Image (cartoon, helix red, strand yellow):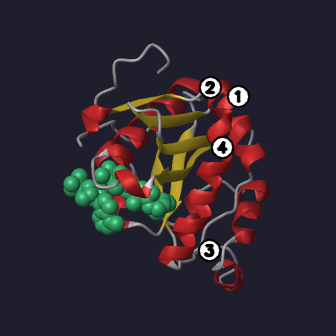
């Protein structure tokens, strides 16, 4: 099996039937890693598909392979790339990287002026983000939109974030500011991006 056995594309409403399976895997994987995660509902994931704010991957036999979505905060000044999940059957093939790159260009297209950011405890994601052009920053550089931070309340590490008065936590924050940072990867050939 190689990355060529998969299709990676912007998700649409027709992909909604996979939303529950995607959410279940997000929760399962977070439990297995013992790390925190903001919980998402199938309804929320479906809404991202409907709005064209998500990227999905399928094996050519039709099984879902991976997913990620974008959210805007602070009236569109900031965009978070969140909810990255790869089906455990298909890990270590380069799918996370392919999905993150598409999610990045989708964010740039939908919100050209926005600062893009992500929070992660995972080495794979830090690596991919660095390869795209993100850099690590302190939480002070991220959105102060309370609704974004509200998402952290369902994370097991939330007491730590509170005890640190939202200044830091176990996640590393990574930011791409289009006014400062340079894109280090090329845009996939896709009219939706
Ligand atoms: C983390 C995750 C997204 C990686 O997906 P993947 O498709 O296997 O990743 P890729 O194959 O694209 O790998 C990208 C890079 O990360 C590395 N990598 C992948 N999994 C890794 C891991 N668990 N630990 C360390 N590095 C890892 C790869 O070797 C690769 O590096 P390279 O480019 O130097 O070869 C996937 O394991 C997953 O869904 N995990 C559970 C959910 C999760 O952690 N989501 C991220 C929340 S922020």
Compute the Cα span from label 1 to label 2: 5 Å
Compute the Cα span from label 3 to label 2: 36 Å
Q: Work out which residue is located at the far left of the displayed protein and give it.
A: 2
Badge 4 or badge 1: first in the primary sequence:
4
Which residue position holds label 3?
Answer: 167
Which residue position holds label 4?
Answer: 19
Image spot of residue 24 (x, y percent): 63, 58
**Marks 3,2: beta carbons within 8 A:** no
In the picture, measured across the screen, residue 85 lies left or right of residue 53, that is left
User: Does dot 1 land on a helix, a strand or a loop?
Assistant: helix
User: Does dot 2 land on a helix, a strand or a loop?
Assistant: loop
Image spot of residue 69 (x, y percent): 58, 42
User: Does dot 3 land on a helix, a strand or a loop?
Assistant: loop
Q: 151 or 137: which is nearer to us?
A: 151
Badge 4 or badge 2: first in the primary sequence:
2
Is 73 situated above or below 156?
above
Badge 3 or badge 4: first in the primary sequence:
4
User: Does dot 4 land on a helix, a strand or a loop?
Assistant: helix
Badge 3 or badge 2: first in the primary sequence:
2
Which residue position holds label 1?
Answer: 50
Work out whether residue 122 can be spotted.
Answer: yes
Image spot of residue 140 (x, y percent): 59, 64
In front: label 4 or label 1:
4
Residue in view at x 44 percent, y 35 percent:
58
């Amino acid at each position: 099996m190689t990355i060529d056995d998969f299709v990676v594309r912007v998700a649409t409403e027709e992909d909604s039937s996979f939303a529950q399976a995607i959410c279940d895997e997000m929760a399962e994987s977070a439990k297995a890693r013992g790390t925190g995660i903001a919980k998402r509902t199938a309804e929320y994931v479906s809404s991202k598909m409907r709005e064209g704010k998500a990227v999905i991957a399928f094996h050519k036999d039709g099984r879902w392979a991976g997913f990620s979505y974008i959210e805007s905060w602070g009236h569109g000044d900031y965009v978070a790339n969140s909810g990255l999940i790869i089906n455990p059957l298909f890990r270590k093939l380069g799918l996370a990287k392919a999905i993150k790159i598409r999610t990045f260009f989708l964010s740039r297209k939908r919100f050209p002026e926005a600062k893009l950011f992500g929070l992660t405890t995972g080495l794979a994601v830090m690596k991919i983000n660095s390869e795209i052009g993100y850099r690590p920053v302190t939480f002070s550089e991220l959105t102060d939109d309370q609704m974004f931070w509200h998402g952290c309340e369902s994370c097991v590490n939330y007491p730590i974030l509170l005890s640190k008065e939202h200044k830091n936590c176990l996640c590393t924050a990574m930011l791409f500011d289009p006014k400062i940072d340079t894109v280090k990867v090329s845009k996939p050939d896709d009219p939706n991006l």
